[in-house]
Amino acid sequence: MEQAEADADPALVIAEAIADALTANKPKARYLEGHGGKEIAAVAALPDRARDLALARELKLPKPEAVA
């Protein structure tokens, strides 16, 4: 829990994104702010197999078996 708090972005980063969304003439559908926001979007755009491999690597798991 302490490590998560240490890695977290300041609340101001998220508050500024919320303020931008509330005051924008044409707000975006999604705001990718804070720690890892852009990385999450990039991973979500990957094909399933590549996403599984990336997740396995990040979690230090063995590579997923190929589905025949």
Image (cartoon, rainbow, N blue to C red):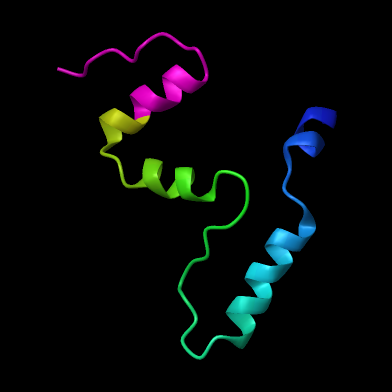
* Quarter occupied by the N terminus: top right
Q: Which residues are magenta?
A: 52-68
The image quarter containing residue 42 is top left
Compared to residue 15, the image places residue 22 above or below, namely: below
Number of marks present in the image shown: 0
Give the percent coordinates (x, y) of residue 32: 52, 58
Residue reaching furthest to the bottom:
25
The image quarter containing residue 46 is top left
Residue reaching furthest to the right:
2
Compared to residue 36, the image places residue 23 above or below, namely: below
Residue reaching furthest to the left:
68
Q: Is residue 15 magenta?
A: no
Compared to residue 39, the image places residue 19 above or below, namely: below
* Residue lying at 77% horizontally and 52% vertically, measured from the top left: 10
In the image, is 51 to the left or to the right of 7?
Answer: left
Q: Of 60 and 24, which appears nearest the observer?
A: 24
In the image, is 34 to the left or to the right of 31?
Answer: right
* Residue lying at 72% horizontally and 48% vertically, measured from the top left: 9
In the image, is 46 to the left or to the right of 19?
Answer: left
* Residue lying at 43% horizontally and 19% vertically, measured from the top left: 56
* Quarter occupied by the C terminus: top left
Give the percent coordinates (x, y) of residue 60: 50, 12
Compared to residue 26, the image places residue 6 above or below, namely: above
* Residue lying at 52% horizontally and 65% vertically, measured from the top left: 31
Q: Of 53 and 21, which appears nearest the observer?
A: 21
Q: Is residue 54 magenta?
A: yes
